[in-house]
Image (spheres, rainbow, N blue to C red):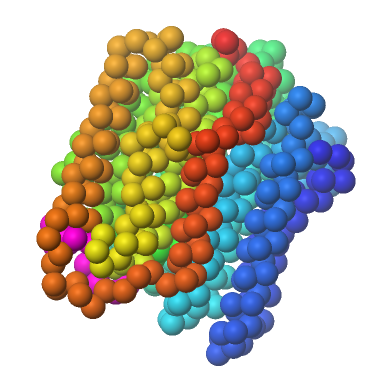
Amino acid sequence: MTASDGYVLLALVLIPIGTSVLLMFTPSKERGAVIGITGLSSLAMFVLSVYAFAMYDFEGEQFQGMLTIPWVSNVGLLGEKGIQLKLGLDGMAATLVLLTGIITMAGTWVSWKLTHRMKDYFILLYLVAGGVYGTWVMLDVFFFFLLYETAVLPMYLLIGVWGSTRKEYGATKLMMMLVGASILIFVGIFGAFSAAGLGTFDMEELFRAGETGLIPRNTQILLFPMVAVGCGTLAGMWPFHSWSPDGHASAPTSVSMLHAGVLMKSGAWGVIRLGFQMLPQGAEYWAPALMVIGITAALYGAISALRQTDLKLMTGFSSVSHMGYVFVGLGTLNVIGMSGAVLQMFAHGVMTALFFLLIGGMYDQSHNREIPNFSGMAKQMPIWTIFFVIAGLASLGLPGMSGFIAEVHIFIGVFRAYPVVGGLAVLTAAITATYLLRMFSQAFFGEFNPRWSHLREINYRERAGATVLAITILTMGIWPAPWIDRVANAVAQTIPGVSM
């Protein structure tokens, strides 16, 4: 990437936020205009995301497309750099930028069938997208946290107004837990800022302060759990995960897609950026605890999913389990395990977005998500079933799918560091296969239930979104090199203290 590509990164943040502002001035009755604006905006984000991923040179500088716009300087306790709008991309962020572009476009398409306040829905949805993009590309801690919160706060209204089932309960629980967790992040950020004594929120400066010991080791050990729990709550970290299944079950389709697909990943990203990169000595001290939490979440989520009869709740607990793998990978403190954690963020984001797209498409017709109530759906909705099986096989880690690429990295990394935990991780994969294959047999095959004879295939917009997601799953599974090259090199070069 060249220096001018910094404006591409800035555009990725400003396009969705600008779209939200433009929609505020668009009459609500003009559905065609809303569809046209969001269609062009989502396509632009997708194209720029693919461009950023493809143009990132994994053999070049670690942070590329650097762009700095001074915002505040020499004010009070702030030093020369102070707070500044600073953007840049490393290999890990490039992968997550691509993930966001794919899911936002697919989520936009499936939302065009909304009839209730569609314009308002997109205003909030695109604020989430803009905030998430900002967390990937911002290299200033102040703006990182500002956009992190921008992505979280609209979720309350998106679920509370457009959700289903216990939507008020799900929205309130989600918001209370995530805002409460943000207090810990706030304390951790300002603790590191104060300890470094540099008078700047520049991430690169703070990364060096943590690596060189300018932020004292004991301070890092104290602050790391605040950052890890604060950001980890958004990532579904056990035991602070309980908001996640309820939130997923209540959320409308595209909100579930963005929520599980990219927003939860921004929580894990915060653990990497603010924890492993800014507080590396604290991360080294707490890595075994993170490993225990991760494998507990993986097992707990898989066993809980095994007991669910609601498709969305099953997928919600499955997300807790798969995000547990992310923390297991991070806890290995070796390149292959930590690379697997980031690859898992991408792989799980795509597969869970596909799950929620398909569940939403079916629920809109049946108003039922109970697995025992369905049978023989492969005969009634064969295209829907094919896409669902692709997502399920990716989730259980079938070779040739994206999930396999991520999980094999995590398993190798964890067996190198903690063989017992590696055995438990493989057991989790076996439980995952059990509940998914059982669900396939109950809902898709067997004698058709005539109660559902009125169901029709998902519409063409949903098929288009599902096709994009399915192609991504297969592409990463068959040709993983572009993802592995970018992620592994970034982990090795930007996270201090990792072993090969």
The stretch of residues the image draws in magenta is 364-377
- Residue sitting at x 60%, y 84%: 32
Q: Position of residue 249 (x, y in %)?
A: 30, 58
Q: Quadrant of residue 459?
A: bottom left
In the image, is residue 278 part of the stretch drawn in magenta? Answer: no
Q: Position of residue 343 (x, y in %)?
A: 52, 33
Q: Is residue 484 left or right of residue 51?
A: left
Residue 274 visible? The answer is no
Q: Nearer the viewer, residue 308 or 169?
A: 308
Residue 224 position (above or below residue 88) = above
Q: Is residue 473 left or right of residue 123?
A: left
Residue 437 visible? The answer is yes
Q: Position of residue 56 (x, y in %)?
A: 74, 37
Q: Nearer the viewer, residue 241 or 387?
A: 387
- Residue sitting at x 65%, y 75%: 37
Q: Is residue 494 left or right of residue 350?
A: right
In the image, is residue 370 part of the stretch drawn in magenta? Answer: yes
Marker count (numbered): 0
Which quarter of the rendering shows the N terminus? top right
Which quarter of the rendering shows the C terminus? top right
- Residue sitting at x 81%, y 45%: 6
Q: Position of residue 449 (x, y in %)?
A: 13, 67
Q: Quadrant of residue 294?
A: top left
Residue 329 position (above or below residue 271) = above
- Residue sitting at x 39%, y 55%: 387
